[in-house]
Image (spheres, rainbow, N blue to C red):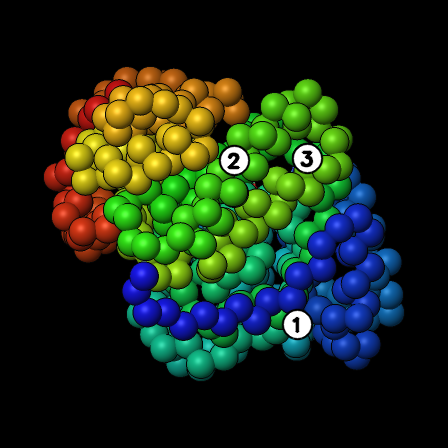
Amino acid sequence: MKNFSFHNPTRLHFGRGQIAQLDSEIGKDARVLLVYGGGSIKRNGVHAQVMAALGQRTVVEFAGIEANPEFDTLMRAVALGKENGVDWVLGVGGGSVLDGSKFIAAALALDPAVDPWLIVGNKTPLHAALPIGCVLTLPATGSEANFTGVITRRETQDKLSFKNAAVYPRFSVLDPTVIDSLPARQLGNGLVDAFVHTTEQYLTYPAEARVQDRLAEGILSTLVEVAPLLRQNQGDYDAQANLMWAANQAMFGLVPLGQPLDWASHAIGHELTVLYGLDHAQTLAIALPSLLRYKFDAKRAKLAQYGRRVWQLNGDDDEVANAAIEATRRFFESAGLPTRLSGYGIDDVAAAAAGVEAQLIRHQRLKLGEHGDITPADCRAIVLAAG
Ligand code: NZQ
Ligand code: ZN
């Protein structure tokens, strides 16, 4: 196990009715910028619960954060926040809204002489952000308790992340009943995104991180167990709760400690989203099985461990590792996410592969994977094989 330091300052309020905790978290005289998406929170009653909990506090609302949050949209929210002298940012939504809230909170605290686009990609030092609170409505990204934001700028074909301790949410509310209103597509996306976050911090090579491995295997097994329960009955509270906690723990920061990491599927996936507008999780369903096949030899030992412990497979390492990749593919497809480009109507696979390669070069993502040996040319081959 490698050395590590760990600190996660986000307080979590988990369970039914916990949106009411907003009242204990945000000062009575706060001026709150309430940030949300396209309106699902108005339809499912979450907005009403948030407003009830905020009571008499001054609330300025910014609606319309889109999936894969756009820099220009977020800058409009920053302007509204400035105009109204807000001192808290409350994001209510999925990963896009929460990532957007982190950017807005950072931009509101930035020296006005600095171009806020430089926050993205960590191109300017970030010393502070407004305090951030979150009400999660889509278990998937783990953004509710991490220090990452992923921001898109379509005009320049950039979808890039930033990471800074200043944007850890002060608190997050995780009420599993928000899953009641999730469209099947978003439920599937959540299952797959949480799954791939876990595998990217686990399917590398053995590193004697036994607790972290078993935490990863526990998260993966839980996702496999709850997926059919939610398909049968999306209102199954225990299944909802276990999905929400699994997705949170996948990105809370414990799984990667002391471990080699391989974020290549996410790197490929972000470029596929920018190029083709696919949902984030859809790109991962395409990239991961193909990447596991491409790096089979390097990952064989962990793939075999995964196959035995998560999928209860038997046989020698080769057999189990192969069958584990196929089980992963079937799991994604059972969640409603095709694992090949053709499943999303992308037939010019060579163009997609070349596009991803060019984007990765432009974004300087040149040495990916746990050994730093996955180049943009390798990513091209991985995408090509996913046709
Ligand atoms: O906009 P509204 O109307 O709210 O509808 C949303 C949106 O259309 C809908 N939705 C959310 N909760 C709902 C709901 N509909 C009904 N009932 C509810 N309870 O779902 C749609 C998708 O929402 P979005 O926030 O885009 O999805 P997700 O949570 O999958 O977030 C994806 C974004 O997070 C980034 C991705 O790149 C992408 O931009 N990621 C962030 C990470 C992080 N911060 O650590 C890590 C991830 O790997 C990922 O890259
Ligand atoms: Zn993800």
* Looking at the image, residue 213 lies above or below residue 186: below
Label at residue 314: none
Is residue 88 in view?
A: yes
> What secondary structure is found at the residue carrying circle 3?
helix
Q: Is residue 44 left or right of residue 364?
A: right
Residue type at numbered disc 2: Ser
Element at label 1: strand
Specify the quadrant of the image occupied by residue 228. top right
- Which is in the foreground here, disc 1 or disc 3? 3
In the image, taking residue 316 as reference, residue 220 lies left or right, namely right
Quadrant housing the C terminus: top left
| Residue, disc 1 | 88
**Could you tell me which residue is drawn at 72 percent across and 37 percent down?**
238
Who's the residue at 61% across and 40% down the image? 243
Q: Which residue is mark 2?
A: 221
Relative depth, front residue between 265 and 182: 265
Q: What residue is rendered at 66% in x and 26% in y? A: 229
Q: Along the polypeptide, which appears first: circle 1 or circle 2?
A: 1
Callout 3, which amino acid?
Answer: Ala
Sequence-earlier tag: 2 or 3: 2
Viewer can see residue 267: no
Work out whether 1 lies above or below 184: below
Q: Closer to the camera: disc 2 or disc 3?
A: 2
Q: Choose top left, top right, bottom left or bottom right for residue 84.
A: bottom right
| Horizontal and vertical percent position of residue 90 | 66, 63
Amino acid marked by disc 1 = Trp
Residue 365 at what x, y percent from top left? 21, 52
Q: Which residue is mark 3?
A: 239
